[in-house]
Amino acid sequence: MTMCRAACLATLGGLVAGHGHEHSLLLGADPNPAGLGYEEVPLDLSYDHVPLQVEGKVPSFLNGTLYRGSPGAWPDGWWLDGLIMLNAFKFKDGQVYYSMQWNKDEAYNHTRSQTTGPEPLAEAPVPGGIPHPANSSWPTGVAFHQVAGEIVGSTGVSNLNSFDGDSLAPLEMPFAYGDSIGAPYLSPTHEQTLDGYVLSHLVTGMQKGSGGEPSYIITSIKPGSRSRDVVAKIEHPKESSPFKGLPSFQHMQLATSEFYIMVEAPCYYPSSATHVGNVDWAGWQSDLLASGHVRLVSRASGESTIYPLSYSVFAIHHINAYHDEATNEIVIDTIQTLPSFIPCSLAFKNLKMENYVKDWKSTGHGLSMSKIIRLRVPLDKPGAKIEPKQITTMTGMEFPTIRYDDYNGKPYRFAYGTWMSSGGVPTYDALVKLDVQTGEHVAWKVDGHYPGEPIFVADPSGKEEDDGVVMTNVLDTNKNQTYVLLLDAKSFKQIGSAGPTPHWIPHGFHGRYFDRKLNAPSAPELLVV
Ligand SMILES: [Fe+2]
């Protein structure tokens, strides 16, 4: 039950597959030009610091590691349930070294031994939790962050896995927090790291056997700590979640120095728990008559203020949020994944591999429809209705990133993302840089090349927000291989590349570049990589 790979629902191409499905049988007959990225990778494969061939320039300030999670085998036939490959690109002295290990969680081990993962328990080990043993290790590696200097991978469950940043070997499965909150719970795949704090929330009481009340529990980890402090517990959030007062599914949250921010759409977790490694994708619930809400939770007092939206905005990935001091508004930039008339309960049923591989024209059409939205939340008018506005008419951007380490939760100008250059391609075939102030964008694209989520790394000698590089892995379907791409972030022109990797890397999820401890107690320390 990697709820969250619902995660990268980003990629929820099939999302809108309901739309256009009528003609998809006719359209889907051609081979998928990006089909290589859905082919299985041997489960016994691994690589350890393989030097890659560098072309062009690798800036000397790159002295860290890009981690990238990608699914490489799909034992249950759902793309977002794939077993996770941990890929690492280590930059040192102008060279690039590639390592890969499978994330050796319960789903991986059971797949290798051809056994089935543990069935749900009759009762959760913690009130409101998931009815599975507290030490269950779900597939993670969909998104990465750090807790007390350790690199952890996450999916849609509070059980994270920590791994060695150099060897990629598992350290703790699951990662042990220093508090008494227990595990496992449903939780967003993403967390927010801001000024050294790590913020997230737990969702309780959603499944048969969970016990406890349907609630949100918002947590914060202080810099350097590995214990979660409870910021707020919100039981039966009826005001923002009209559907039985159930907490809504959120793949991601946002934060500023003042607020924990939730964008609540009428989309709700399945009520049945499945065995470890699987999600009941057909069991999601929705309420088309309900609209969406923004919830601002004070990080100081735990009090919520709720703002209704004029229409529902279902977003998998948000871009950023900040306090606009001039207007006294919280600005939220996000990507509306689904048109408001398509409920997630319908869309999630189309996330099967066959839809990605065979029905790729409908899937690609769905991916190309995402919209980039700005919400302005007036702090002077608590509860006021919010009218979503499009930042740009450009569509089809996903996996949005920013200069995260310095600008998360703060006023910013640039976002980077993968991009569908047209509605006729199977998956993201370009990268895009968006100026969120003007709506202007610039793209990078090479025919037959499919890039992953772009990651910004700052040039320490730079002065401006976009002084640095943007890096990602790219699947080259002309040569059937993968390479790492380096773009100058300002011009968005290629400055270098490294590759090929000894085995291609399938279409992936998220990545992070680490060269320091982001929630260290004081000044950032160098992370040994
Ligand atoms: Fe995600």
Image (spheres, grey):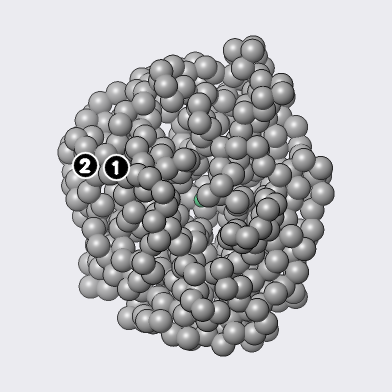
x and y percentages locating residue 487 in the rendered image: 68, 68
Q: What is the secondary structure assignment of the residue under circle 2?
A: loop
Q: Is residue 123 left or right of residue 445?
A: left
Residue 470's mark? none
2 or 1: tag closer to the N-terminus: 2
Q: Are marks 2 and 1 in contact (CB under 8 Å)?
A: yes
Q: Is residue 305 left or right of residue 33?
A: left
Q: From the viewer's perspective, is residue 350 above or below residue 314? A: below
Q: Is residue 68 left or right of residue 340?
A: left
Residue visible at 60% across and 66% down?
471
Residue visible at 56% across and 42% down?
408
Q: Which residue is mark 1?
A: 225
Nearer to us: label 2 or label 1: 1
Residue type highlighted by circle 2: Gly
x and y percentages locating residue 336 in the rendered image: 65, 41
Instruction: Return the residue nearer the eye: 296 or 197.
Output: 197
x and y percentages locating residue 33 in the rendered image: 67, 75
Q: Which residue is mark 2?
A: 178
Mark 1, residues whose alpha carbon is within 10 Å: few (<14), some, or many (≥20)?
A: many
x and y percentages locating residue 140 in the rendered image: 37, 57
Residue visible at 36% across and 67% down?
528
Q: CA distance from mark 2 to mark 1?
A: 8 Å
Residue 180 picture quarter = top left
Residue type highlighted by circle 1: Ser
Q: What is the secondary structure assignment of the residue under circle 1?
A: loop
Q: From the viewer's perspective, is residue 400 above or below residue 333? A: below
Residue 333 picture quarter = top right
Badge 2 residue CB within 8 Å of ligand 1: no
